[in-house]
Amino acid sequence: MNKNDWMSIRTGDIVLVRDYPNPQYKEAHAAPTKTRFAVVIGNFRGGYATLPAHAIVTKGGKTEQPYYRLKENELRVPANIISDRADIALKGVIKAHRFPLIQMILKVGSLPLETKIQLIDIHETIKNRPIHVLEMEKENPYYAKFMGFFKEVTLAEKMQFMRDDRGNHQYEFVRNEEFRVKAIQLLEKRNHLHILSVQLEGDKGTFTHTFATKKSLQEIREDWKEPKKAKEWIREDVKFYALWKNPFLQLKPDPQPHPDKYQSLEKFRERSSVLER
């Protein structure tokens, strides 16, 4: 397998996994691996045939019993996530402290945004628990990178950053691609923020996003004239930093741009320079 096998897999997708590692196999006298469902935590497109994932477990059906209490490293799988290729109802809990590299068999569903944010919240808790840190470091020393990637991609989805015309979120697949400002529109000034709608153009397409920035118009004219990678552009929006501190934060709706009021960055630089005189 190579990276082309993973082109349809996204962070937060639920997949059926071939040979998911069973860390308790010796104690349980069971097979060292088994086929199970899991949540993909990252897709780095690095040419590898494996992806980091969290296991979904039922503990022999115990997780579905009314007496079962979730542990701090567990999140219940949302109801009614059913495969479009097979009539499979998913049950159980996501083990948020597991980070093995897995091989998928097929995609069966996707976590809703709200559940991804809850998973981030669990990550923020268990990364400060020595017992979980030891387990994560032992299983995969790159677990912090996976957690950070998952959080970044999820926040981009909440911000609708790099969403295409069909409503698909492309950020995790273009985050290292360069984009330049194709057109820009100043929407309003809100306290110390400038709110701008920007069309970003690159080899992977054109995406429109509304930025909130503390930068002055002069700083915008200078800082945004050169291409940046998508992962740099998202950090030009103060909403990203606000959500990084609190992923549950409810964002204020963005003002709507006028389709006829976009202008090139060059014209924007000329006109905004006049406004500041």
Image: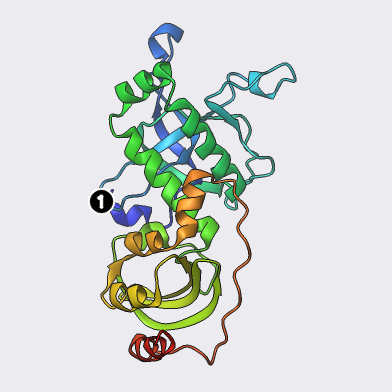
* 267 sits left or right of 253 in the view: left
Residue at 44% x, 77% y is 198
Above or below, comparing residue 32 to residue 189 in the picture: above
Hey, which quadrant is residue 142 in on the image? top left
Residue at 55% x, 43% y is 117
* 231 sits left or right of 37 in the view: left
Q: Position of residue 109 (x, y in %)?
A: 56, 48
Residue at 32% x, 74% y is 224
Residue at 36% x, 25% y is 136
Which amino acid type is shown beneath numbered disc 1? Gly
* 242 sits left or right of 135 in the view: right
Q: Position of residue 40 (x, y in %)?
A: 44, 42
Which color scheme did the rendering employ for the protein?
rainbow
Examine the rendering and report whether any part of residue 156 can be seen.
no
As rendered, which of 23 and 97 lies closer to the eye?
A: 97
Q: Residue lying at the far front in this picture: please name it.
A: 277
| Category of crowding for the residue at label 1, using alpha-carbon neighbours closer than 10 angstroms: few (below 14), some (14–19), many (at least 20) | few
Examine the rendering and report whether any part of residue 39 can be seen.
yes
Q: Position of residue 166 (x, y in %)?
A: 54, 72
As rendered, which of 272 and 142 lies closer to the eye?
A: 272
Above or below, comparing residue 210 to residue 61 in the picture: below
- Provide the secondary structure element on which disc 1 rests: loop
Q: Position of residue 141 (x, y in %)?
A: 28, 29
Above or below, comparing residue 246 to residue 59 in the picture: below
Which residue is labeled 1 in the image? 46
Task: Work out which quarter of the rendered image holds the C terminus and state it.
Answer: bottom left
